[in-house]
Image (cartoon, rainbow, N blue to C red):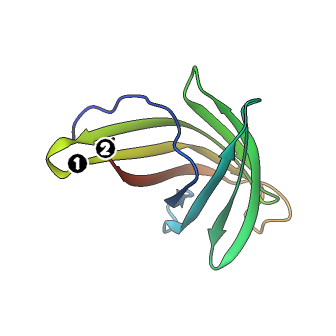
Amino acid sequence: MRQMTRVSLPYPTTWEIRARFGGRPVSQGTLFIQSVLNNNSLSGAVNFRGNFIPIQGVWNEAARQIAFHTQFASYVGTLLYQDEPLLNLRHYVLRGQVAMKPPSIRAGETGTWQAVIHLPLR
């Protein structure tokens, strides 16, 4: 795989998201990034197992870092991308750490997460 480079966060967008906790199977879902406001606040939702859960967070443009939380978990991560000119695509990747919190049945567990989206090159 080619080296990844940092770039600005696209929105509104729908991402495929996966979370892994220890040796357990991967949880798959959808991450919706609705907006990033001038004060760097971020809003949207995650959907695991058919449940849309609102997210609130922040986007740090200079560091290309994201942090958001739901009522069940807190996520932090970094944005990277890879261009594929022959396919006219840019592959965006968010990846980082997740910590589960009450009232989740996984409260106290930590793991990793990764979200991807493929958009046309501009």
Image quadrant where one finds the C terminus = top left
- Residue at x 30% of width, y 39% of height: 82
Label located before the other in sequence (2 or 1): 1
Determine whether label 2 and label 1 are within 8 Å by CB. yes
Q: Which mark is residue 121?
A: 2
32 sits to left or right of 28: right
Between the residue at mark 2 and the residue at mark 1, the CA separation in whole angstroms equals 5 Å
Residue at image x 63%, y 37%?
66
Identify the amino acid type marked 2.
Answer: Leu
Q: Nearer the viewer, residue 64 or 8?
A: 8
Horizontal arrangement in the rendering, residue 66 relative to residue 83 (left or right): right
Q: What percent of the width, then of the height, locates residue 77?
A: 57, 38
Instruction: Left or right? Give the position of 118 relative to 35.
Output: left
Question: Relative to 53, does residue 117 appear above or below in the rendering?
Answer: above
Image quadrant containing the N terminus: top left
- 85 displayed left or right of 118: left
Q: Label 1 neighbourhood size at 10 Å, few (<14), some (14-19), many (20+)?
A: few
Question: Which of 120/57 is in front?
Answer: 120
Residue 80 x/y as whole percent:
42, 35
**Which amino acid lies under the numbered mark 1 shown in the image of this protein?**
Asn
Number of the label disc, if any, that sits on residue 102 = none
Could you tell me which residue is drawn at 49 percent across and 61 percent down?
23
- For disc 1, the marked residue is 88
Disc 1 secondary structure class: loop
Nearest the viewer among 42 and 18 is: 42
Residue 76 place in picture, x, y as percent: 64, 39
